[in-house]
């Protein structure tokens, strides 16, 4: 007997037998009705990817571009381990779809510095031993850099007393602005010290 036809699937939905390559040289699968092509700059390099429309920016970075510095901690935007910069503003990459970032400039922890040329915030984290297991550290560093930028630009937080005066680099301001980044090892005191130390040397 002839087996029944599979009417719920379409050839374009099936995994391709041979992989394709993006302009950046990374493997990508054949397109389907649920895919879109997206091009963005990541750490100064242009990448074009064919992605399922439901792919988060975090998964695009980790699973397609192999930039695994940004971590998947909760996948609900509650821990901050996936913090990256999009057009110089920090976001939780797990909460944003990759296809929303056509033409955007994205910077991950890999784009901030190298082992031989650390960003001042990275150097401060090392100097102050501001990490233990290190899992949340990339997100902490990215958020720490963003905190200094926000304060320098006069962007208020929930603990800012005077909206018309300059914002002080206080412990309370830093703690409030870093409250979205969880450290399960409890290295908060050292993280605070690292951010304060980096405040005068941020590039």
Image (cartoon, grey):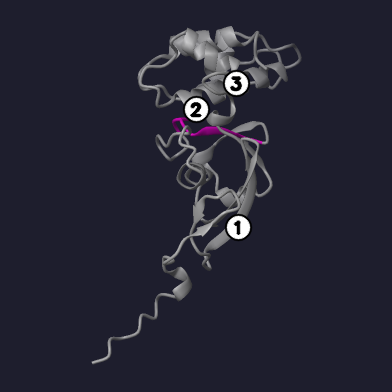
Q: CA distance from mark 3 to mark 2?
A: 10 Å
Instruction: Residue at the far bottom: name it.
Output: 1
Magenta-colored span: 78-86
Q: Which residue is mark 2?
A: 139
Count of labels in the image? 3
Q: Residue furthest left?
A: 1
Q: Is residue 68 above or below residue 9?
A: above
Q: Is residue 87 left or right of residue 97?
A: right
The reply to whether residue 180 is visible in this rendering is no
Which comes before the other along the chain, label 3 or label 1? Answer: 1
For disc 3, the marked residue is 145
Q: Position of residue 200 (x, y in %)?
A: 65, 8
Mark 3 and 1 residues: CB-CB less than 8 Å, in contact? no
Q: Nearer the viewer, mark 3 or mark 1?
A: 1
Q: Residue at x 59, y 11 (%)?
A: 198
Q: Residue placed at 52% from the left, 21% from the top? A: 178
Residue 22 rendering spot, x and y as whole percentages: 57, 54
Q: Nearer the viewer, residue 109 or 165?
A: 109
Report which residue position mark 1 lands on. 37
Q: Is residue 31 visible?
A: yes
Q: Is residue 109 magenta?
A: no
The quarter of the image holding the C terminus is top right
């Amino acid at each position: 007997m002839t087996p029944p036809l599979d009417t719920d699937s379409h050839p374009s939905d099936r995994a391709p037998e041979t992989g394709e390559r993006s302009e950046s040289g990374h493997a990508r699968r054949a397109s389907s009705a649920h895919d879109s092509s997206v091009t963005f700059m990541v750490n100064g390099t242009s990448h074009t990817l064919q992605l399922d429309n439901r792919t988060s920016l975090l998964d695009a970075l980790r699973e397609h571009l192999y930039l695994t510095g940004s971590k998947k901690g909760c996948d609900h935007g509650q821990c901050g381990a996936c913090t990256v910069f999009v057009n110089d503003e920090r976001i939780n990459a797990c909460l944003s779809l990759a296809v929303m970032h056509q033409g955007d400039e994205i910077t991950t922890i890999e784009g901030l510095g190298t082992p031989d040329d650390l960003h001042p915030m990275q150097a401060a984290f090392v100097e102050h031993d501001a990490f233990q297991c290190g899992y949340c550290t990339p997100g902490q560093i990215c958020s720490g850099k963003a905190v200094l930028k926000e304060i320098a630009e006069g962007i208020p937080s929930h603990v800012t007393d005077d909206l018309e005066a300059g914002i002080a680099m206080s412990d309370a301001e830093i703690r409030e602005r870093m409250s979205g980044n969880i450290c399960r090892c409890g290295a908060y005191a050292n993280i605070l010290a690292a951010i304060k130390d980096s405040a005068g040397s941020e590039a």
